[in-house]
Image: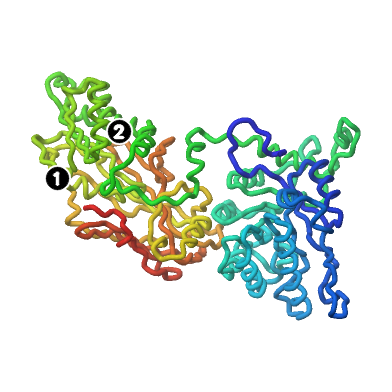
Amino acid sequence: MPLGERGGWERSESRYCGVETDFSDDVPSLLSFHITTGGFDYVLAPLMDPSYRPSLVEGNGLETRVLPVSGSDLVLSPSQWSSHVVGKISSWIDLDSEDEVLRMDSETTLKQEIAWATHLSLQACLLPTPKGTSCANYARCVNQILQGLTTLQLWLRVPLVKSGGGSVDATSEGLTDSWELWNSFRLLCEHDSKLSVALDVMSTLPSENSLGRWMGESVRAAILSTDSFLTNARGYPCLSKRHQKLIAGFFDHAVQVVVSGKPVHSLPKASDSNTEGTQRHPLRSYLDYVAYLFQKMEPLPEQERIELGYRDFLQAPLQPLMDNLEAQTYETFERDSIKYIQYQRAVAKALVDRVPDEKASELTTVLMVVGAGRGPLVRASLQAAEETGRKMKVYAVEKNPNAVVTLHNLVKMEGWEAIVTIISCDMRFWSATEKADILVSELLGSFGDNELSPECLDGAQRFLKPDGISIPSSYTSFIQPVTASKLYNDVKAHKDLAHFETAYVVKLHSVANLAPSQSVFTFTHPNFSTKANNQRYKKLRFNLPSDAGSALVHGFAGYFDSVLYKDVHLGIEPTTATPNMFSWFPIFFPLRKPVEVHPDSPLEVHFWRCCGSSKVWYEWSVSSPTPSPMHNTNGRSYWVGL
């Protein structure tokens, strides 16, 4: 493939580039010219002669006329149809026209062409841009068709129009924000999981905030007009910096690129022919430039490659208080060296503050690791003691009997028997024989408190001396509204309420962050009592950037930031995230029904953290601009086991 001939691991699944063509009844020649000669991967081609109208077909009613489709299905093999052709539905159709004949012709043609595309086993078809401002009947017909599709994807063509002005596509008179058109269409389609958008990229682009919305939408293709290209010093086509950035973002989100239009660059004569003297494809220079943009993308870092399979994959959060973790889970977290380096820094600072240099050889610091797992925090703490020259006695408290086996072997292997005492017990029920100077834990979840760190440390802080130090000393949860159509459709596919009232851990990728995150709940240790704070509530108000245009909120991304000790931080909140750390993915709180928001209308959100006698759960809702039902995880088996 022209875009995929790269060494190493691919950054993107978007390795293909298509070309938009006119109608041809000789499909083999069409493919030969554009794919074999031109180097494109597939053609975006009309399925019917554009002059065809059902009402103009003559017949006596007793015979069925052969439709003017692209010849016989036998001219290509099924695999060629599937891999090299994306069908283009006739652009003249107008299902919301006031002309009844045109409207009926449009409906008949749409159904015929989709049926033919399905027969050919095409992977996708491009629907034309809705005409005018009303698209109710168009969406109704598409919704009917979507119910019967199994593998065929439908792409709705939408011009990428500048919010509040800019160039307007001739087929969509009066359109000032392409997102509004897309949103009104897809909201009318109940069966929208097989409906995606193909954006016409023009020479003028919307603002960065306006473009950012599309990264959370189901964009499958970017149709790049030749008119969008500039000319470089050598006379070849190139793109502006903003266009380059947009195309790179599309590549990273597996969006296909389609080159469209007539050549508008007069290339140097030396490049008109190749070495064999045959004529070059007239759009080859545009393809070469798109390939160049793909080739120069930085390869994914090693950790991103490892996490590639987790992108936009919904997972139920871990419940380590209720369930014992498996060895593979421990191993994954233990590979996160950055996290333990931060813990080592925090313990080292605490040791120096606890014991002055002149008493380093006299005083022994008692340190307790509560929730020791297989020992990475024990190792980090002992390395901090060695680094600072402080004497230390360690208690490693762990409730998982399987992890305790590993702990005993680790202590024996490292020769720590005189320093480390292993306690096989739930920290909440252990009676310590002495008080600790430092209490260390890593009970934080993606949302900070969702793995019950407050409740666990509330029960364990009785081990700590009155002037003792807790690491972490505090942690705060954050949320931000997001557009995440894939995540929403994945939750919706379960067809039940329970999944909409579940908070998921997910490696966010095809997501648009609509506003900066805001803090929700903060817990501080030691000497904090969850019993006096068994319910926490926060109301938040988010405003979209003024130049962003409207957007659809599918849910909320949750993060945390923690202060381990003094200036040592650890967290995943986007603006303060610890670099190169991978122990936590964000958490996703879905909405049963997406909420449309506008820059001039704030989004008001309510979050509760509730505690019962045996479990902890969250509740969340939107009150403005459109009220949503109350969502809650109570009874969904989350965080049970207090």
CA separation, marks 1 and 2? 25 Å
- Write the residue at 41% across / 62% down: 500
Instruction: Tell me if I can see residue 612 in this picture.
Output: yes
In the displayed structure, 98 sits above or below 288; it is below
In the displayed structure, 19 sits above or below 272; it is below
Left or right of 602, for residue 20? right
Badge 1: residue crowd in 10 Å (few <14, some 14–19, many ≥20): few
In the displayed structure, 239 sits above or below 544; it is above
Q: Quadrant of the N terminus?
A: top right
Expressed as whole percent of the image width and height from the top left, the position of residue 546 reads 53, 59
Left or right of 168, for residue 326? left
Of residues 134 and 148, the one nearer the viewer is 148
Of residues 227 and 153, the one nearer the viewer is 153
Instruction: Tell me if I can see residue 259 in this picture.
Output: no
Left or right of 519, for residue 230? right
Residue 343, which numbered label?
2
Expressed as whole percent of the image width and height from the top left, the position of residue 496 reads 43, 65
Label 1 secondary element? loop
In the displayed structure, 149 sits above or below 245; it is below
Q: Quadrant of residue 585?
A: top left
- Which residue is disc 1 drawn over? 429
Q: Amino acid at mark 1?
A: Phe
Expressed as whole percent of the image width and height from the top left, the position of residue 158 reads 67, 60
